[in-house]
Amino acid sequence: MSKNLKYSLLFLASGIFITHCVQAPSPEELRSSIEIVDMETKWVAKAYQPWPPKLILVPCISFRVKNVSSKPINYLNFNAIFKFKGETENLGDAFLAAIRKEPIMPGQVSEVITMKSNYGVEGKSLATFKDNPYWKPVVVKLFVQSKGSIHVPLGEWDISKTIDFKEPEPVGMGEVKKEDEPKQKKEK
């Protein structure tokens, strides 16, 4: 047997051994080991330009993960799918490999995880969105995946109409300063 063939077989055997030793958690195990807490939904700016006026807002979620199991949890990937309520087509999505190096210990809560849709809605300014009766409600479905498991649904949340963006003041529109008037010479 050639040396390359021996190394190839050894590599293949070790890969099969590792794959069978690290088994992916079942959907029930994964779902029951974590809890989503401190969920916040809003809209944030993806792009803004004052002239010609253009503002693109995207839905955004932020949350924390609580470990409700008896084992440390790491290697969590999240997938968020954003849709207009009642629609079948996606508005946008986001994928994030969130928990990696530092595991979440039993009973502990992760740092804040933020996910923004890659697509949103476009208008000319912030006023375009505020109090707009045609602004459709958006929902987000959140999924988790770990160590080769399937994507497990965690829930669905409504995206609030809160907008986390403030338009800068137009240039040159601030208060105009009066220059000092030239002093008149007093006649003697």
Image (cartoon, grey):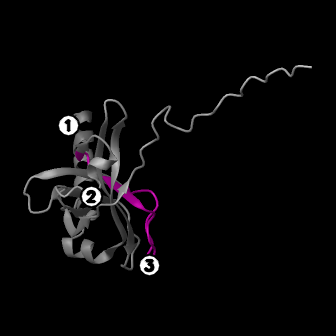
SS for callout 2: loop
Would you say residue 102 sits in the magenta stretch?
A: yes
- Under mark 2, the amino acid is Asp
Residue at 33% in and 59% down:
42
Magenta stretch secondary structure, dominant:
loop
Would you say residue 41 sits in the magenta stretch?
A: no
What separation in Å lies between label 3 and label 2 (alpha carbons)? 41 Å
Residue 5 x %, y %: 21, 37
Nearest to the observer: residue 168 or residue 114 = 168
* CB-based contact (under 8 Å), mark 3 and mark 1: no
Q: Which residue is mark 1?
A: 1
What separation in Å lies between label 1 and label 2 (alpha carbons)? 76 Å
Placement of the N terminus among the 4 image quadrants: top left
Query: Which numbered disc flags the more N-terminal residue, 3 or 1?
Result: 1
Residue 33 x %, y %: 31, 75
Sort mark 1 into few (<14), some (14-19) or many (20+) by Cα contacts within 10 Å.
few
Nearest to the observer: residue 28 or residue 172 = 172
**In the image, is residue 68 above or below residue 14?**
below
* CB-based contact (under 8 Å), mark 3 and mark 2: no
Nearest to the observer: residue 75 or residue 114 = 114
Residue 77 x %, y %: 30, 58
SS for callout 3: loop
